[in-house]
Every structure is written in structure tokens, then in C-alpha cells.
Image (spheres, helix red, strand yellow):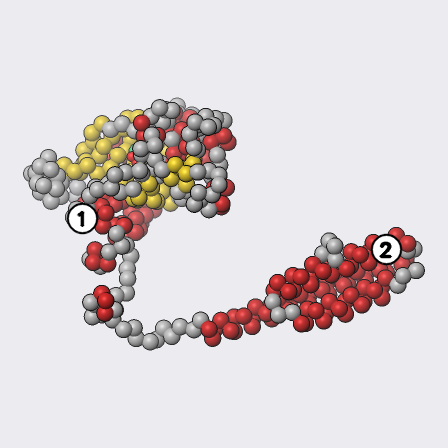
Amino acid sequence: MPDLVAEIKTLEGQATQRIAASTSVEALQMVAHEFVGKKGALTAVMKQLGSLTPEERSLVGKAANDFKTQLETLLADKEAQLQDARYESLKESEFIDLSVNPKPHAALGVKVPFGGHIHPIAAMQKKLEDIFTSMGFSIVDGVQVEDDYHNFGALNFTEDHPARDMQDTFYVQAHGGAGVPADTMSSVPGPEAHGGAGVPAGTRQPYLLRTHTSTVQIRALEKMQPPLRIIAPGRVFRYEEVDASHEHTFYQMEGMLIDRKVSVGNLLHLMQTLLTEVFGREVEVRLRPGYFPFVEPGFELDMKCLVCAGKGCSVCKHSGWVEVLPCGLVHPNVLQSAGLNPDEWQGAAFGLGLNRLVMMRHGIEDIRHFMAGKLDFLRQF
Ligand code: PHE
């Protein structure tokens, strides 16, 4: 009869030596693999158990378990030791002396070192977040690579709505990794997951770069129970001819509130409070009808021109008013597609264009400045 306990002891000796001699985490993994892996040495020993009496078997079983426990401890200790050594050596090789005085950057022609600061759009976003959270809104996140369902279908865009056209939307190849990281794709459920409310397979590619933050209305309704108040800031993309007032990549902040009773009056009051905070003085607003498939009624909200106080100037194109944001009451179809009864729940939604707000706030004439990465521009804020 083979002395399996002795064999296990021998393995233990060998493994201990190998671990001691290992100089990397990969080497340790190899040891674990060779000794206790599926096809490892211990498994080979255990295959001979059949020829033993029950008493012998329990002895060998215990020896095997002890070996495994012992090996785990040794491996863990050695790994910690290797990590410590790695950090020690990184301390040396990656040391940066932060107390050293940097030299002014000659190429930029600046006398004092330029420390960098918050981008004007990020600053506007933060300001709005503070205002909205103080009014009980919570901030929610969406995804930039979206599916047709969240960007269009669930928002009541009919199949032939012109905004779905390739002209406005960047479509993304769903498979074959056209620049889309695998984890982004897997976190986006395909339209087929929604009972076919999306696109018929094969006619349109289901993934796209979201064209607006309204996608987050749907994502929030999927996760949260009303009553709710949310804002969703983020980057959006359109296939635009770029000029002074159009960019292919820009920033929006979506807002939505759902409650038992929500009126246009509530919406107006909210927007007026918001703009007064943003611009630091009393503003006057008005509504004009506007069409968006996911709101009914839908509006364009204008603000009395702050530059000329409504008298007419070049900023407001001599009308006395500037268009600020689109908004409206959430369309019953949108509530319904989120499983809410439109007789029970009502909602309001608005879409703030962050670039536009910053442009109005600081009198910036060209939207392309934001993405140009020009320090001359950025340093003014
Ligand atoms: N999502 C719309 C756009 O980007 C704006 C909008 C948001 C309109 C919310 C109404 C309500 O054009």
C-alpha cells in the first residue's frame, strides 16, 4: 500500500521550497497550480485513495487538508512580502519632489507657473448641482453609449422621426469593438430586452452616442419610484456641421420631476428660481410652444435679455428675449412606457444646455472655444 501521507509531506516540503524561491506573484500562481490545481500533484496523490481502508483514508484526507491550508498561508505571506518589496522599490523609482519650485514655462510666455483650474462648463455644472440638490433633486448618471430604446423609442420618437436620422446621430457598431470598451457595451441592455420597442433587427444599428441627456429620464424611471426629482448632467453627441453655435460634443443637464400633481406653473416657477440663482439677479421668463416627442405640452423657455433689459440689442437679435431652454410636461406615453399610470402621475422635464448657459453668462461668442484646449481662452475663467 502506498504511504500517501508521506507523499503529501514530501509535496509540502517541495512546495515550501518553491514558494520561498519565488520572486513574482506569477511564480506563486504557478506553484499553486502545480501542487493543488485540478491537474496538480495533490490531485494525483488523491486518485490513489480508492485502495485504502476508511481509517487510512481519513488520515490522508486530513494530511491533504493540512497541506492545502499550509500552502495558502505560505502563498499569502509570500505575496504580501513581494508586494511590500515592490512598493519599496516604487518609492525609490517613482519619487517626485513636490517641494521643488517649478520653472515658468518659457514657451507659454508666462511669468508665474499656471496652476490650472476648473473648466467653465464643469463650474456651471457644479453650480447647478448645488442649486438643484438644495431643492431636493438628486443627481443621477446615465451612459454615453446608449441604445435606440433609451435615446428614442421610450421617449416617444416614432420610427420615422427625423431626429433618428443618421444626420443627427452617431451610430456605433455594436459588435466587433469599434472603439467601444467591452464593459460599456455590456452595461447597456439591447433594445431586444424591451419587448421590441426599439428597432427592428437589421434595419438600424441599435447602439449610438446619446444625442441628449433625456435618456436618463428613462433610466431613472426604470430604477426609481415616484415621487422623484432628478437631474442628470452629462456629455452628448450630434453629427453636426461644426460652427460658432454648433458642436458635435457638448454638455446638457436634464431635469425631471414626477409627482401626483405637476403643472406648467410649477415648471415655470422652478426655471425662474434657477435662472435667478445662476445669473445672480431677478430674471423674467416666458414660454413659447416647442415640439419634443416626449413632452406634452412642450415649450421653449425664453429669458428677458440681461444685456439690454429687453430693449433689444445684438445679443438678443433685437427681440429683447433670448432662448434659454426647452422644457415641458412629461408625455403620458413616456410615463406609460415606464410602467406608470398617467392618470395617477404627472411630470415635468427640462433640458439645460450647459455650453449655452456658460456662453450667455460670460458673453462667449463661439461654442468651439470649449473643446479647443486653448489656454488663452480657459485662463480667463
Ligand atoms: N432633449 C431635448 C434636446 O436635447 C431637450 C428637452 C429636454 C426638451 C427635456 C424637453 C424636455 O433637444
Image quarter hosting the N terminus: bottom right
Q: Earlier in the sequence, mark 1 or mark 2?
A: 2
Vertical relation: 52 (above or below) 344: below
Where is residue 213? Give x, y as percent.
35, 39
Q: Residue at x 12, y 39 (%)?
A: 316
Rendered view: 69 above or below 210: below
Residue bearing mark 2? 48
User: Looking at the image, is mark 1 or mark 2 nearer the viewer?
Assistant: 2
Name the image quarter holding residue 306: top left
Location of the C terminus (image quadrant): bottom left
Mark 1: C-beta under 8 Å from nearest atom of ligand 1: no
**Which residue is rendered at x = 69% and y = 59% of the image?**
33
Residue 364: mark in rendering = 1
Residue 343 point in image, percent of width and height: 39, 23
- Residue 324's spot in the image, x, y percent? 21, 38
- Left or right placement of residue 73 versus residue 260 in this view: right
Q: Which disc, if any, is residue 228?
A: none
